[in-house]
Image (spheres, rainbow, N blue to C red):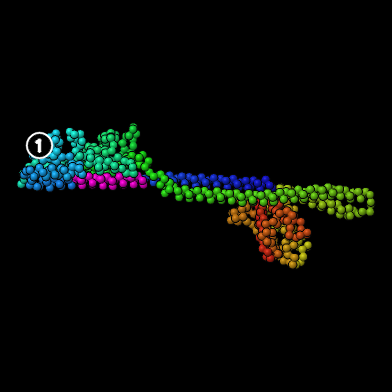
Amino acid sequence: MAKTITGKFGRYYRAIDRLFIVLLSIIFLAMMSILYFVYRNFQAEKTRAFQSEAFYSSKIYSELIQSHIVRLKEKLLQLANSQQIINFDASGETMLIDTYDFHKEKDFVRAVSLISPEPQTLFSVPWDLAIETDVSAQKHLMSLTRDKRPVVSNPFTVSEGFRVIALSVPVFRDEEYMGSISMLLDFDALSKAYLSKVQVRGIGKTWMVDSDGNEMLLPGYSEKISEMSLKTELRISLLKEMKQEKEGMTTYDIVENGKEVKRYLSYSDINFGRNQCWFVCIDASSREVNDALPRFEFIESYCLYPSITFLLMAGFLIIAYIIVSKHYSRMLERQLIQAQKMETSAIFINGIAHDFNNIVQLMKGIPQIMKEGDPKFSGNEMKLIHDLTDRAAKLTSQLTNFYRRAAANETEIDMNNCIDNTVTILQRFFEKKISIRTDFEKNLPFIKASISQIEQLLMNLSINARDAMPDGGTLLFKTELIQKGSPEIHLKNLNHVAHILLTISDTGVGMSKEVQNNIFEPFFTTKGAKGTGIGLSTVIIIVDNLRGRILVESEEGKGSKFFIYIPCGE
């Protein structure tokens, strides 16, 4: 019995362990998956944030550079419309000198010149720069001479080694082209002032190209765009996109250190009209963007609370596992103690039966001795002694076989018929104030069992019912068939076969919950010195031998009901 209980609870433990491991694995995998997708989403959000910040930075600084150049160009237009410049007298020279002195520091002006229509330099401040600068082949002056419109040149290098851009406006006298005024701006100083420190989140490269795709500068970096492994086709496609969109965000792939790297580009144009424009561009590689992600912010904002939630879930699961394990441990301990009591009582009673059987065997020889020694004993008297000793021998045999797991002499039994025979005996011995009734379901299938065990079960439960009704009452025997597919099979945790439900109920004093929890323990009794505590422990062993189940319902003052589920054949 102890091995059976241990095996049953062992299966429960293994099932609980497997369920615990599966649930814990599911929680862990769910946590890892969610954190992975959250991190990927976090990366995408931060990448979009970088591009947006880079775009607005490029837009702001392109507008600053454009406004700087446009403001100086408007100043030159004012000069070109003054009579002193048109007539170019001494006061005109003074105006040019004053303009140079006013703008040379704060607006990075390197020279202001008056150019003839040919074009040749007529006057310049400072003059030494103008002398060393050949203007006859400069594209912007050729364009101005041809179109007679203001023009902004692309950067070019002067003899002193720095790069400049030229702002040139035409001078007219009564619609007659008289030449132009040019202002040279230090492009390196201008771009450095606006763009040298432009970075987004401490990363990124800022560079400029003109409308023809020529690299203009990478302030703060020694490498040029061509040294960044920008392929010609890529540069053409990027330039086409930038000229078409004017401003926006895009991505492109370049080769850095022999590896293809994705870069995120934001750009905005500086528009000078007539399809002439520059582009301020800010970009960074995917690795730079990822390295710039605030990891601690990610942990605090995205990982902290989900991780705490998952840890709490795992903690609750572990606590539940410990509680369930302890519950089953206590149940197993109680069941093992109960089984040990049953086996102890079985050994004890088997020993008594064995000793009693030895005495009976000796008693069986008495009639023969008496027949031979004293002829006064009649045949009937000796037959009576023989029958009594024979019955005692059968009783000890039944008592011995009763505690075996497989009962001896099992036969097919009609439960209703067996109950009828028992009721007939009970009606002779029970007092008249106890009414015995039956309620049978017809055509019940047979059960395979030892008839002596069934009779013992019925007698023990009936005697307990009688003792519970000292003032009289009703004892009811009821049978019914529980089909194989009945919900009660699953509800009562029975074997998946048809069962006969035997209900034995009385209208006696009933039992408290505490008594119900102990009635099947060996030697437990509420009858004091009159009781042995063996009756119901015997009943549960019989039910166990039948592979059935017994349940009890009782309430103090309202009687008791015993429900015995006995499996039957098809």
Callout 1 secondary element: loop
Residue 241 lies in what quarter of the image?
top left
User: Does residue 455 show up?
Assistant: no
Q: Does any portion of residue 4 appear in the rendered image? A: yes
Q: Is residue 313 above or below residue 426?
A: above
Q: Main secondary structure of the magenta part?
A: helix
Q: Going by the image, does 358 lie left or right of 564?
A: right
Instruction: Please name whichever residue, 443 or 450, is drawn nearer the observer in this view of the structure.
Output: 450
Residue linked to disc 1: 120
Residue 219 placement (x, y as % from top left): 26, 39
Q: Residue at x 26, y 42 (%)?
A: 195
- Residue 292 x/y as whole percent: 36, 42
Residue at x-position 10% and y-position 47%:
81
The amino acid type, in three-letter code, at marker 1 is Gln
Front position in the image: 436 or 12: 12
Q: Magenta span covers which residues?
A: 45-70
Residue 561 location in percent, x, y?
67, 61
On the image, the x and y values in percent for residue 212 come to: 21, 38
